[in-house]
Image (spheres, coloured by chain):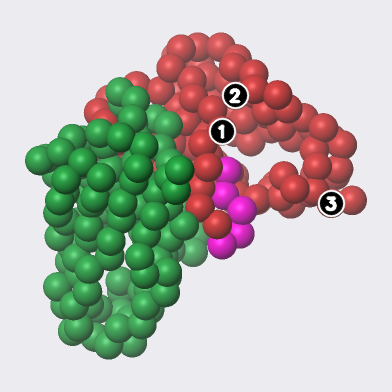
Chain colours: A red, B green
């Protein structure tokens, strides 16, 4: 089976950098995805890592270490609108298994 | 493009009633998914369909059935609703291999009393 662990809450100030970690255990691994969900809204795709290393998309970056079963999402130049829940998800055959999410609160 | 649409947006059922949640996508995606989201539990996969004509169980399939009506539409049926099925239900679709990039609908908020 699969299991994922991520912190339940993180707080940071506007303009800062925050890192959200994700560790996973899975019997079959294809990659690690990250999603953002604002309160009451639909999740939206942020990034995907299939190989080790860093993927950068604007202010957001995502990192994967397959040997450590570990990844993280890095958010730079935090803005108030980044306050949301962030989910990591491991890819299996044609499906994703999601973690329980990290609630990020950005303070002024 | 509308993306992924879901109906209804809200529903209240009494225990034992049945209902079908509808989902449609206009992105020509092969794969479609149904999730439920409960507070503090993240998104849990109920059923998915990797391609038209196929369906598979996810993490929490008990109490649900699905139909992949055609490439566009994937419905979720609750035959006899229970209070434990009170949740927010999301439908998603994916066009790429592996399903790692999924597009979600706005959700259906279901309350079973």
Residue contact between numbered discs 1 and 2, judged by CB atoms under 8 Å: yes
For the N terminus of chain B, the quadrant is: top left
For the C terminus of chain B, the quadrant is: bottom left
Q: Nearer the viewer, residue A51 or B110?
A: B110
Percent from the top left, x then y, of residue B85? 30, 71
SS assignment at label 3: strand
Question: Taking A43 as reference, is A24 above or below it?
Answer: above
Which residue lies at the image location 24% right of the left edge and 50% below the top edge?
A: B73
Q: Nearer the viewer, residue A94 or A73?
A: A94
* Residue A43 in view: yes
Q: Which residue is mark 3?
A: A107
On residue A46, the disc is: 1
Percent from the top left, x then y, of residue A60? 67, 28
Q: Magenta span covers which residues?
A: A36-40
Instruction: Identify the image quadrant of residue B54.
Output: top left
Percent from the top left, x then y, of residue A5? 49, 40
Query: Do the residues at discs 1 and 2 belong to one chain?
Result: yes
State which tag comes first along the sequence, 1 or 3: 1
Q: Chain of mark 1?
A: A
Percent from the top left, x then y, of residue A66? 44, 16
* Residue A68 in view: no
Disc 2 residue crowd, few under 14, some 14–19, many 20+, Cα 10 Å: many
Which residue lies at the image location 42% right of the left edge and 69% below the top edge?
A: B9
Residue A39 within the segment the image draws in magenta = yes
Whole-number angstrom distance, CA of label 1 to CA of label 2? 9 Å
Q: Residue furthest left?
A: B53
* Numbered label tally: 3
Disc 3 residue crowd, few under 14, some 14–19, many 20+, Cα 10 Å: some
SS assignment at label 1: strand
On residue A62, the disc is: 2
């Amino acid at each position: 089976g699969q299991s994922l662990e991520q912190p339940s809450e993180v707080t940071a100030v506007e303009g800062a950098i925050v890192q959200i970690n994700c560790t996973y255990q899975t019997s079959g691994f294809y990659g690690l995805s990250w999603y953002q969900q604002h309160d009451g809204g639909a999740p939206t795709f942020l990034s995907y890592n299939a190989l080790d290393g860093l993927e950068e998309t604007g202010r957001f970056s995502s990192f994967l270490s397959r040997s450590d079963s570990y990844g993280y999402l890095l958010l730079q130049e935090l803005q108030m609108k980044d306050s949301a829940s962030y989910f990591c998800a491991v890819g299996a055959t044609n499906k994703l298994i999601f973690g329980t999410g990290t609630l990020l609160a950005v303070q002024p | 493009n509308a993306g992924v649409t879901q109906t209804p947006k809200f529903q209240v059922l009494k225990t034992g009633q049945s209902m079908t949640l509808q989902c449609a996508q206009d992105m020509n995606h092969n794969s479609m998914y149904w999730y439920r989201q409960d507070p503090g539990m993240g998104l849990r996969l109920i059923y998915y369909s990797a391609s038209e004509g196929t369906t598979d169980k996810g993490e929490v399939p008990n109490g649900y059935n699905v139909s992949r009506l055609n490439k566009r539409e994937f419905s979720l049926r609750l035959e006899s609703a229970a209070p434990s099925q009170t949740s927010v239900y999301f439908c998603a679709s994916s066009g790429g291999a592996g399903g790692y990039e999924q597009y979600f609908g706005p959700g259906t908020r279901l309350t079973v009393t």
